Image (cartoon, rainbow, N blue to C red):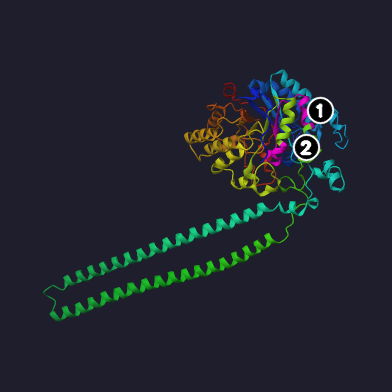
């Protein structure tokens, strides 16, 4: 863990209680009218900033005072979302102009002077910011500083030349020492230990269950035996009564007595036989179970032996370099090395000079706390009013822990799944960022309200849980930016099962000012128009296109809510 940041005077009062409207540049305004599903999934539809300027009065009419725009850097051929950067120095002409590109200059990052140049596309961003400021709307940019796309000239230069000046900007496995290589694997070892422990606990639980089951079975057997005895006694008693009749001769009586006695005994023998049969059946079942258990045990033994052997032997990292989510085409940047760290800070300074007011830090978990401290300190010395808002969703990243630099592996292990059970642990992780970032996207707020929308909890429990969540941040100097959906989530209305009334209740919670809090809130474009989707974005490749449909501007507009 790093030391917290030095005391630099900052003022983010303008950001308190702000209402942020998120624009997904390629899908908001100016999109082409005809497109196929393939283009919708992973291609440009040519929404652009120049066209978005014409929609600023609309956004202002809904009383938003901040616009968050998705990344605008020069991207790879199909990087319509902006997260596959091939040059941080300039705005992608497609994000500036859309389909009718007026200037296709994308710069050359290998040129040392490239960052200082202003292209025509950069000028469109300057115009967009100017028009926003004219309407008293601030602009929040989205910085993707954790990784680049594989065709980025820096990575290509480094990959093809071991002596490249950019080589240390990335994490090439072959350049690492044995200790560095081995440090990639402790998480797998921890996960393995955890799996075995869980397996053992489940086994013990199962055995205990079986014991209780057997005890109950024995008790039931005894009860049934006693009941049967009583029934037979009653039958014999009844039959004996019949023998009292005068018409029956004495010797007949004796015969019948014998017969009844015999029948009673046969009944008991029969019952005992049935019970024995059941017992034998159960014993066989148990034996079979035990055999299966033993076989399973042996299998697990072999499996565990193999896995333990695997842990002992030399392991190889699956890729030639560290990358975002183990996607080889997104090589991870080493921000702690120079001049990589300085370069990214200079990139930010360029866009702040152009008028950017706030910065959303994509995948903030990928940077070390040392680097976050350095970056925010250097910016705040010159620009004390620029808040840094981090994206910190730890629950989805446990399997790629070797690329997480800002929190401990132990804390990552506490969060297996993004649900209500993870909330206390995510709160702990959030608290670690106080003093390094000025705010975080509040995934816990989103998950609590989502549970309400999906009927997992009722309204009162939802509010109670939110208050408990906020209690942990009393006296802490960090914004928890509220949101309910985004370009990476299912749309709010879809989560509400397309129930508009329920969606309005969720939005009312979003707009609620909780005691002692001054957190901003975010509305994803199209929410005001009740935009939804037909299926979840999960369970299929490129499924996120469902939540990134082009804005249709029909405007059922929930103006009353937004203008409160």
Disc ID at residue 410? none
For the question of whether residue 363 can be seen, the reply is no
199 over 552 or under it: above or below: below
Stretch of the chain drawn in magenta: 346-371
Nearest to the observer: residue 485 or residue 110: 110
Residue 202: image location, x then y, percent: 52, 57
> In front of the other: label 1 or label 2?
2
Marks 1/2: CA distance? 23 Å
Whether the residues at callouts 1 and 2 have beta carbons within 8 Å, the answer is: no
320 over 302 or under it: above or below: above
469 over 294 or under it: above or below: above
Disc ID at residue 122? 1
Report whether 531 appears left or right of 45.
Answer: left
Residue holding disc 2: 341
Nearest to the observer: residue 518 or residue 19: 518
Q: Quadrant of residue 258?
A: bottom left
Residue neighbourhood size for the residue with mark 2, other residues' Cα within 10 Å, grouped as few (<14), some (14–19), many (≥20): some
Residue situated furthest left in the rendering: 246
């Amino acid at each position: 863990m790093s030391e917290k940041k030095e005391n630099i005077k900052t003022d983010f009062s303008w950001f308190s209680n702000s209402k942020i409207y998120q624009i997904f540049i390629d899908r908001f305004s100016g999109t082409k009218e005809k497109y196929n599903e393939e283009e919708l999934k992973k291609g440009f539809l040519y929404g652009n900033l120049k066209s978005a300027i014409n929609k600023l009065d609309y956004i202002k009419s809904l009383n938003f005072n901040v616009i968050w725009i998705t990344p605008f850097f020069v991207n790879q051929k199909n990087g319509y979302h902006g997260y596959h950067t091939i040059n941080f120095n300039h705005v992608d002409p497609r994000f500036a102009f859309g389909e009718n590109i007026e200037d296709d200059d994308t710069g050359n990052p290998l040129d040392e002077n490239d960052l200082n140049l202003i292209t025509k596309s950069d000028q469109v961003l300057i115009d967009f910011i100017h028009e926003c400021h004219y309407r008293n709307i601030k602009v929040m940019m989205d910085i993707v500083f954790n990784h680049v796309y594989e065709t980025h000239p820096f990575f290509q230069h480094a990959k093809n030349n071991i002596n490249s000046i950019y080589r240390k900007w990335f994490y090439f496995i072959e350049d690492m020492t044995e200790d560095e290589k081995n440090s990639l694997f402790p998480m797998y070892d921890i996960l393995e230990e955890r799996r075995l422990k869980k397996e053992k606990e489940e086994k013990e639980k199962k055995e205990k269950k079986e014991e209780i089951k057997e005890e109950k079975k024995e008790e039931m057997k005894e009860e049934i035996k006693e009941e049967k005895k009583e029934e037979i006694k009653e039958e014999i008693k009844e039959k004996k009564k019949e023998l009292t009749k005068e018409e029956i001769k004495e010797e007949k009586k004796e015969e019948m007595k014998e017969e009844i006695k015999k029948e009673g005994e046969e009944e008991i023998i029969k019952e005992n036989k049935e019970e024995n049969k059941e017992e034998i059946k159960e014993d066989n079942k148990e034996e079979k179970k035990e055999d299966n258990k033993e076989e399973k045990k042996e299998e697990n033994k072999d499996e565990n032996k193999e896995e333990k052997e695997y842990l002992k032997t030399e392991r190889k990292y699956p890729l030639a370099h560290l990358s975002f989510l183990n996607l080889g085409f997104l090589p991870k940047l080493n921000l702690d090395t120079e001049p990589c760290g300085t370069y990214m800070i200079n990139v930010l300074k360029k866009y702040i000079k152009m008028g950017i007011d706030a910065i959303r830090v994509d995948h903030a978990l990928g940077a070390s706390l040392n680097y976050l401290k350095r970056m925010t300190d250097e910016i705040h010395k010159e620009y004390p009013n620029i808040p840094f808002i981090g994206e910190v969703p730890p629950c989805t990243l446990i399997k790629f822990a070797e690329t997480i630099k800002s929190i401990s592996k132990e804390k990552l292990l506490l969060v297996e799944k993004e649900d209500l059970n993870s909330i206390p642990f995510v709160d702990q992780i959030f608290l670690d960022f106080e003093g390094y970032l000025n705010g975080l996207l509040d995934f816990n707020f989103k998950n609590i309200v989502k549970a309400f929308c999906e009927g997992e909890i009722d309204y009162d429990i939802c509010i109670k849980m939110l208050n408990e969540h906020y209690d942990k941040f009393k006296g802490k100097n960090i914004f928890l930016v509220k949101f309910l959906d985004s370009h990476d989530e299912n749309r709010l209305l879809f989560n509400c099962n397309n129930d508009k009334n329920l969606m309005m209740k969720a939005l009312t919670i979003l707009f609620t000012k909780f005691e002692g809090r001054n957190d901003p809130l975010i509305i994803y474009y199209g929410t005001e128009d009740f935009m939804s989707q037909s299926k979840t974005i999960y369970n299929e490749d490129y499924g996120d296109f469902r939540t990134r449909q082009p804005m249709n501007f029909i405007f059922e507009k929930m103006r009353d809510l937004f203008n409160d």
